Image (cartoon, rainbow, N blue to C red):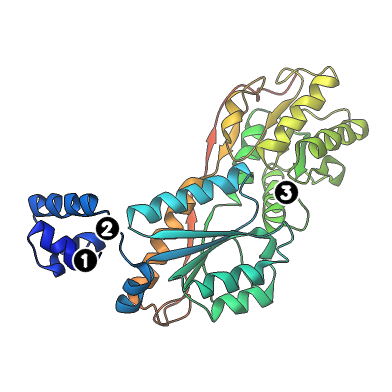
Amino acid sequence: MSIKDVAARSGVAFQTVSKVLNGKGSVTPATRERILAAVAELGYVPDAQARSVRTRTTATIGVITIDFSNTTIAQHVVGIEREARRHNRDVIITSVDEQGSDCERSLRILRERRVDGIIVNAPAVEDREDIAELLRTGPPTVSLHHLPGDHHTLVHSDGKASALLPVRHLLGLGHRRIAMVTGWSARRISHVRHQAYVQALEEAGIDYDPALVEEGRWDVDEAYRATHRLFDRSGDITAVFAQNDQMAIGVLSALHDRGLRVPADCSVIGCDDIPIATQTIPPLTTVRVPFYEAGETAVRVLLDLLARDTSQPSTGSGQAPRDVVLPVHMVYRSSTGPVPE
């Protein structure tokens, strides 16, 4: 079965069939319907390998990600896959462990599959210079997280604003003793949000107190224990900023077990706006981070690089790398309120 059989069945030239199957060129709706009907009747499946030899493209995007059972990572991946599909691109997804130790293997697999470009969604490799160099010399690449060097195109949310907004919100409610539960201390986003927390306090004339900060490692149980450590040390805390919503859930649980009411005795604010944030008790005030939109944007940016020059490294045609920053915004619910009298 070949494209010429489809052309014969639909009564058109095989070049017209090729236009329809590749989503290119101008074909009347009636002709398109006739060709697609012939494809269905004959059970024709295009030979991807033959097409890639002809067009010098596989119409495939490779994705390197960490465990996508993680809610926020999964939103990135779904955004990538759906946007790629809208542009008639297939996606090959490889996952690496939390330390990123098998990233070289994922890169090798994607190169063997001759993907047109790569999207990296693995914060575990954000400081790996060896991985950054491999990516620089490979197909065009867009990363959703920092990579070493100044030659990578990035798409990410505004990490600084994701901490400034919630801390300023708490300050506006009159809070002065604001604790923070951080993510993994080794992650850049943890440092960015920590610095923004300090900045917001300094803007309000409040000295930074390290006793009000504990590491929660992005985990509910770790955040639960971190909250107890904070309140064992400092009983005058009136608000807690958790650097993600998963940890905010742990904070809420710890406060409940200590007999503290939210927000009457202590306000709690998270970051990410994961789906369960609407179902916590009380519903969680948080910052919406556009994970899905970041995935979509990464695909569009990558396709733009490919359209300019697929033969160049990730900057494409020798152009300067792009740094695309997506805005975040507050989502106000019931877990924050005025400072207790």
Q: CA distance from mark 3 to mark 1?
A: 64 Å
Query: Going from the N terminus, do you reach mark 2 or mark 3 first?
Result: 2
Residue 27 seen by the camera: no
1 or 2: tag closer to the N-terminus: 1
Question: Which percent across, then down, holds residue 267?
Answer: 71, 26
Give the residue type that dot 1 points to.
Ile
Residue drawn where x is 85% and y is 28% of the image: 236
| Tag 3: amino acid | Val
Q: Nearer the viewer, residue 122 or 283?
A: 122
Which residue is tagged 3?
Answer: 198
Quick check: 225 left or right of 244? right
Residue 15 seen by the camera: yes
Corner quadrant of residue 272: top right
Q: Nearer the viewer, residue 153 or 37?
A: 37
CA gap, disc 1 to disc 2? 8 Å
Q: Quadrant of residue 55?
A: bottom left
Which secondary structure lies at badge 1? Answer: helix
User: Quick check: 341 above or below 135?
Assistant: above
The residue mark sitting in front, 3 or 1, is 1
Residue behind mark 1: 3
CA distance separating discs 2 and 3: 61 Å
Q: Secondary structure at mark 2?
A: loop
The residue carrying mark 2 is 44
